[in-house]
Amino acid sequence: MAEDAFAETLGAAIAAIERSAIGYVLIGGVGSASLGRPRWTRDIDMMVAPLDAPPALDSLARAGFATERTNEHWIFKAEKNGIVVDLIFRTVGDIYLDESMLRRAVRTEFLGVEAQVASPEDQIVIKAIAHDEQSARHWNDALALVAACDVDWTYLMERACRGARRVLSLLIYAQSSDLVVPNWVIEELFGSIYAEDES
């Protein structure tokens, strides 16, 4: 069964990385489904720091994954049971795993597997920035996180610095869909963007 194979592969990947004491968070479909809207995903997106990417790939290889150094600028890949693990160390907007992201990570469960998942705030920012015509799911995942989670709006605004206009547009759209986004968040984010333009 596909779900069983996915859970087994996810568990093996998490166990390998945690055995090596490498800091990580899950993002992508698993990350958003763990905290926001349930949806199926075909791969596992694991974010690590750039310096940790080679040892993380080695850890997955030792756990029986077939591995490749796909792109030295942002992603390596590993595969087992037909399931791909995307080992991401740089996202759109030049976002890297840092201490704040690790500190805010949420320990949760997906298909019975416990793992570290990026906070809703970090996921909202990443997904707002990554959204494009080919991946509209990112926008909808971010909106589901706004709807489902108790968002720390101050932290979200701090994290939005890499793509403030994208995040602002997402939050305005969220308000238009009757999701709860405080007005002060919109006002402060708008002011921080356009005050810079005028100076």
Image (spheres, grey):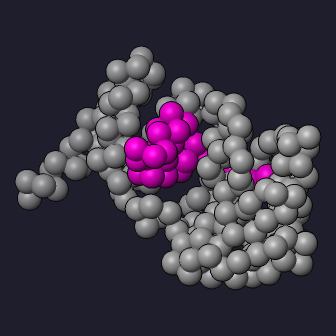
Query: Relative to 91, does residue 118 appear above or below in the rendering?
Result: above
Query: In the image, residue 195 lies at what x, y percent?
Result: 15, 50
At 70% from the left edge and 82% from the top edge, which residue is drawn? 54
* Segment colored magenta: 112-141
Can see residue 96?
Answer: yes
At 21% from the left edge and 44% from the top edge, which residue is drawn? 191
At 59% from the left edge and 59% from the top edge, which residue is drawn? 101
Could you say which quadrant of the image residue 38 lies in? Answer: top right
- Residue 136 left/right relative to 55: left
Magenta stretch containing residue 145, yes or no?
A: no
- Residue 198 left/right relative to 65: left
> Hey, which residue is sitting farthest left in the picture?
198
Q: How many marks?
A: 0
Could you say which quadrant of the image residue 81 lies in? Answer: bottom right
Can see residue 124?
Answer: no
Quadrant assignment for the C terminus = bottom left
At 55% from the left edge and 47% from the top edge, which residue is drawn? 123
- Residue 78 left/right relative to 149: right
> Hey, which residue is sitting farthest top in the picture?
178
Query: Relative to 96, does residue 124 appear above or below in the rendering?
Result: above
Q: Nearer the viewer, residue 169 or 160?
A: 169
Q: Nearer the viewer, residue 98 or 86?
A: 86
Query: Relative to 72, does residue 44 appear above or below in the rendering?
Result: above
Quadrant assignment for the N terminus = top right
Query: In the image, residue 173 lies at what x, y percent?
Result: 35, 29
Q: Main secondary structure of the magenta part?
A: helix
Query: In the image, residue 9 lies at what x, y percent?
Result: 86, 56
Query: In the image, residue 105 lies at what x, y percent?
Result: 66, 53
Magenta stretch containing residue 134, yes or no?
A: yes
